[in-house]
Amino acid sequence: FMMRSDIAFKAHTAVTVWHGLLLGVYMSTLCRHGSAHKEKPSYFWALKNSDQELAYSHMSTIESVRSENSNILAMACQASKGKEGSPDQSVWFTRSDDGGKKWSKARVIVPAKGYAVWGPVLQFDDASKTLFLYYSESGDFSPIPLPPEKHMVGGEIRVISSQDGGDSWSSPRTILPYNASGVYFGAAKVTANKVATVGITGNHSTWLLPFWQEVPKNYVNSSNTSNCAGVLSSIDRGQTWTPHGCVANHCTVAYTNVQMYCSHWLPTFITLCAWQCTVDLIEASVAPISTDGTQLLMIYRSGGSPLYSSTSRDTGVSWTDALPTDIPNPNSKAFMFARSDQQDALLLAYNPTTHGRKPLALAQSVDQGKTWQTLVTFDDGSKEYEYPTTVQVNRTTYTSYSAPTSKGIKVAVYNLE
């Protein structure tokens, strides 16, 4: 009995040790591949509507203001005491100097002057240490009477700049007017996503600011202007800008009209007919998909699911027609950008669903945007997560979003593996 017990004890000990070794190897392997322990995101309020007596805040933009001794985060959004498009809708601004944990008291930097201000976009230029803010402003442009309590989305695209991290700002300058020439005449222009720096050669590069335009409903002008999306391009670090592209998609929807067609033509056949419809492409973001930065991918919100995309092979001068992707979307803005610490990798902040703006995810593509792998899903208990924008600092991402528009703007902080 003693002998058999001793054998059993030794066998049990050997199995236990073996299991321990296997577990150790397994955990070591997981750690090497970054899957054993994924650090959870942290969430912080950048702006609470209740603190500013606001009823609405949306379309946030976030940027890193870099210097030798500090790294300040800046956030701007459109906000009002009424609803979206109210005459008091202005651009509000706040900063954080501790990695997004605490934010300064938000203040207005682009006040509404009787017309709504839309789509703020922050960009920091390392060479000149200048912080730019692009936005679109409504005005007395539309030939169609609009309700006085709500303005049409967009107007003219303007820019202001700051040399001191946002403490003071320059006077506004218009870079794309409402009545620009050619296909851009007579349409409201709108911005939503950040500037992409592409085609970098030595000290030269191209800045691309995505925009879209909307012709007032029930109005047809003589210039054949239509709803479409494009980019503003600058080769002199923002001194001058040129619009390129008027990307649209014409979808074909098949239907059968058996009764009418058969009664006049062939009663024994069902005839398939077609009619044309247009998918409005808005709130685009652009990123390079080639090493030299001349080949680009642009993705668009399309009014439903999925996201659409088009490409350029000449640094944004011309674009292919937009086609649907495999990326689901609940009719909400997404944001795509080039990962700064990994060559040929793209990151995408978006709602990975077809209905409801929840949850919010950060995904990565290493094949020029053809497929995407989720890195993290953000979930702070909010009712909705809307309109994300992300900035990467070293290996940390800061994603601002509406949480939701009736509550304010939050920032999710996540360390990339």
Image (tube, rainbow, N blue to C red):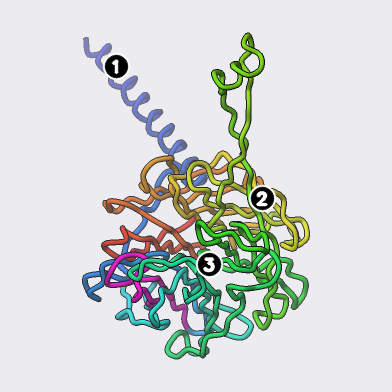
Q: Nearer the viewer, residue 379 or 220?
A: 220
Q: Which mark is residue 8?
A: 1
Residue drawn 29% across the image and 16% down it: 8
Q: Is residue 290 visible?
A: no
**Image depth: mark 1 or mark 2 in front:** 2
Q: Which mark is residue 310?
A: 2
Quarter assignment of residue 277: top right
Label 1 vs 3, first from the N-terminus: 1
Magenta stretch encompasses residue 119: no
Residue drawn 74% across the image and 78% down it: 203
Neighbours of disc 2 within 10 Å: few (<14), some (14-19), many (20+): many
Residue drawn 28% across the image and 21% down it: 9
- Image position, residue 305 (x, y; %): 49, 41
Q: Which mark is residue 100?
A: none
Q: Which residues are magenta?
A: 70-92
Q: Nearer the viewer, residue 350 or 342?
A: 350
Label 1 vs 2, first from the N-terminus: 1
Q: Amino acid at mark 3?
A: Thr
